[in-house]
Amino acid sequence: MKIAFASIAYESLAISILSAIAKKEGHSVKLLHTPTLFKDGLTREFKRLARFFSIDSEIFKQLKAYQPDLIAFSVVTFDYQRALHYAEIFKKICPDAKIVFGGIHVSSVPEIVIANEFIDYIVIGEGEIAFREIIKHIEKGDSCEPIVNTWYKSKNNTIIKGRQAAFIQDLDSLPHFDNEIWKDVWPLNSYYLTMTSRGCPYNCSYCFNHFFRNIPEEKSNYIRRRSVKHVMEELNIYKKKFKFKVIEFWDDIFIFDKKWLKEFLEAYRKEIAIPFKCYIHVNLLDEDIAIQLKDAGCKWVDFGIQNINEEYRKKYLKRNETNANIVNALKILKKHKIVSFADYIIGMPGDTIEHYEEARLFFIENMPDIIEPYWMTYHPKTEIIEKGFEHHILNDEKMDLVNHGYNPHGYFESSMASKDFHSEYYFILKVLPSLPVFLRKKLTYSVSKKIPYPVKLPIFVYSIFYLAIKHRSPRIKLFLALYMKQVIWILKSKLFSKQNI
């Protein structure tokens, strides 16, 4: 069978694992990647540049020539509407191809996704077993048998719903990620992305984990991890193949299992020894873990704070760490010279200007290396939606937009509850770590309001690049490498359009 994976903007580990499964079972695989440069959320949208660097026509030509039997999308809320746009066109180009949608957004609002006439199958929850069964179902032709973790339309347009199976417990039973599928579009020699586990031990109200863990009808462990041997096999294979310079472990919480972590980091230090970044939680970080991370090559860690007011954080976000935990984690990271990225959400329901002032004063005394403010974005089925309604930020009409992926606000733009003080504190938090210590106290809300936008913009850009260079940020390296590689790739495709991109 010929299978095409449709990718929008970024590397997807879901595509990587499904491609590995398809290849293992002897199917032909092709990546249809639309870079969406200059309108991908990483930069401001530049419409002329975005049009020039669009390769839609080339992608459509490739699709027509390839004529796959199956076209698979993995989507989150942010790119759902764009995925629909391409899926509808793809169906017109390849009317006999079956289109499959999976991903977090699909799992949260399956009835909305399956209602699109050009979508044939949707996968709810984990997709590896379902994907194999969908392939078999397409090969068999007309059949009304239910497929695990899947909804699909029969010939008379009835929706057939399969049972929701338990989560895959043995992650070693899965093949290694097929990262080769990205080699033409993703800077694999610079940056390597992988995961060693699935699931999160926490239950934050704004995150998909709290509903996703309850999808299966059968009881099963939500938090699972690959063996050290399995992960090391993958890293050794791709280290030789791509000679990458940085690894990012995309696990929700990389350090949750101290026994596994110690074994893995010892093996990693001996066999891989490449700088890496991972995600931690301040409640789990201690001196021993920091030493092990540092010795193994950990240069950067990312963790969430989201709101500095402890009462708000516990009541609204279901986060139980204290500010003392945050202070302790920052001290440990600074002691061991591990760069700290602290995530902070702007524009959450019920937050106040007093919360942001509390955050500003906290960070002046306890400064992370980089503060990453993100605008509040509502995702379907997340618990914080209830607070959005309570504070009259959301209503049925706005919630319908969110469920259909029309949410007009994103992580880098603004939020539904955006007020003037949100924008000012977004600016303050972003630039604060880049300022000399003696200037940090002077950047107050009233001072920020007086700075005109034409002055703020260069300060903002300066802070990003200054901190990136100072701390050798892998995110900026990835961003620059990704844009450079994809710009060259697109220019080549335009010059040699008859060749495969």
Image (cartoon, rainbow, N blue to C red):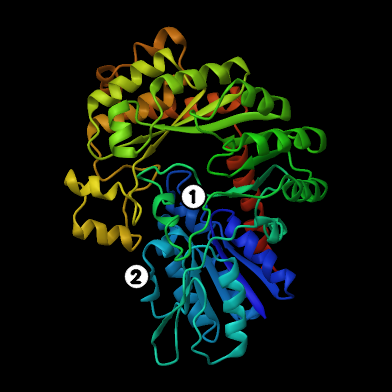
Q: Looking at the image, do the residues carrying marks 2 and 1 touch, with CB atoms under 8 Å apart? A: no
Query: Mark 2 and mark 1: span between their CA atoms?
Result: 29 Å
Is 286 situated left or right of 84 in this image? right
Residue 240, placed above or below residue 301: below
Is 418 situated left or right of 127 in this image? left
Q: The disc labelled 1 sits on which kind of residue?
A: Phe
| Residue 414 visible from this viewpoint | yes
- Please report the residue visible at 23 percent of the width from the left and 32 percent of the height from the top: 420
Residue 324 disc label: none
Of all residues, the one furthest to the top in this rendering is 438
- Please report the residue visible at 64 percent of the width from the left and 48 percent of the height from the top: 194
Residue marked by disc 2: 112
- Disc 2 crowd rating (10 Å Cα; few below 14, some 14-19, many 20+) is few
Secondary element type, mark 1:
loop
- Please report the residue visible at 54 percent of the width from the left and 28 percent of the height from the top: 465
- Please report the residue visible at 69 percent of the width from the left and 64 percent of the height from the top: 20
Between residue 417 and residue 470, name the one nearer to us: 417
Secondary element type, mark 2:
helix
The percent position of residue 422, horizontal first and vertical second, equals 28, 32
Is 499 situated left or right of 322 in this image? right
Q: Earlier in the sequence, mark 2 or mark 1?
A: 1
The percent position of residue 451, horizontal first and vertical second, equals 30, 22
Quadrant of residue 259 in the image? top right
Quadrant of residue 334 in the image? top right
- Disc 1 crowd rating (10 Å Cα; few below 14, some 14-19, many 20+) is many
| Residue 454 visible from this viewpoint | no
Which image quarter is the C terminus in?
A: bottom right
The percent position of residue 96, horizontal first and vertical second, equals 54, 87
The percent position of residue 154, horizontal first and vertical second, equals 45, 88
